[in-house]
Image (cartoon, rainbow, N blue to C red):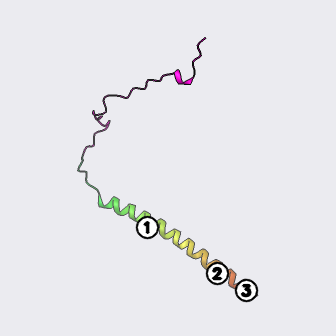
């Protein structure tokens, strides 16, 4: 009788031999000299600033309202 254990199993794992060959990217990087419209940039900046301003006004008004409510509560 012969019994084979885990030591008798051989796993042959081969590594690829083409490691030195670099693969070409699927999309080559093309340098384009596209022009940017200054009005588009200004409108994006204005939208961002208006969102930040609305957020800041909301936070400031809620703090003032909370301080007013706290003042009325403590004065009673």
Q: Badges 3 and 2: C-beta atoms under 8 Å apart? A: no
Q: CA distance from mark 2 to mark 1?
A: 27 Å
- Stretch of the chain drawn in magenta: 1-30
**Residue 10 to residue 50: above or below:** above
Quadrant placement of the N terminus? top right
Q: Secondary structure at mark 3?
A: helix
The residue under label 3 is 74
Extreme residue in the bottom direction: 75
Q: CA distance from mark 3 to mark 2?
A: 10 Å
Q: Residues within 10 Å of mark 1 (few under 14, many from 20)?
A: few
What residue is drawn where x is 44% and y is 23%? 12
What residue is drawn where x is 24% and y is 47%? 32
Horizontally, residue 50 falls left or right of residue 74, namely left
Q: Position of residue 15 (x, y in %)?
A: 37, 29
Magenta run includes residue 21: yes
Say which quarter of the image contains residue 65: bottom right
Q: Position of residue 35 (x, y in %)?
A: 25, 54
Q: Position of residue 33 (x, y in %)?
A: 23, 50
Horizontally, residue 59 falls left or right of residue 29, namely right
Of tags 1 and 3, the one toward the viewer is 3
Q: Residues within 10 Å of mark 2 (few under 14, many from 20)?
A: few
Q: Badges 2 and 1: C-beta atoms under 8 Å apart? A: no
Q: Residues within 10 Å of mark 3 (few under 14, many from 20)?
A: few
Query: Which of 67 and 10 lies nearest the eye of the viewer?
Result: 10
The residue under label 2 is 67
What residue is drawn where x is 56% and y is 71%? 58
The residue under label 1 is 49
Mark 1 or mark 3: name the one nearer the start of the chain.
1
Q: Main secondary structure of the magenta part?
A: loop
Mark 3 or mark 2: name the one nearer the start of the chain.
2
């Amino acid at each position: 009788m012969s019994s084979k254990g885990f030591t008798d199993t051989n796993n042959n794992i081969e590594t690829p031999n083409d490691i030195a060959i670099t693969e070409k990217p699927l999309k080559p990087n093309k340098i384009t000299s596209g022009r940017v419209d200054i009005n588009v940039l200004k409108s994006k900046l204005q939208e961002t600033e208006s969102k930040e301003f609305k957020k800041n006004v909301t936070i400031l008004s809620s703090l003032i309202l909370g301080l007013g409510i706290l003042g009325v509560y403590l004065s009673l």
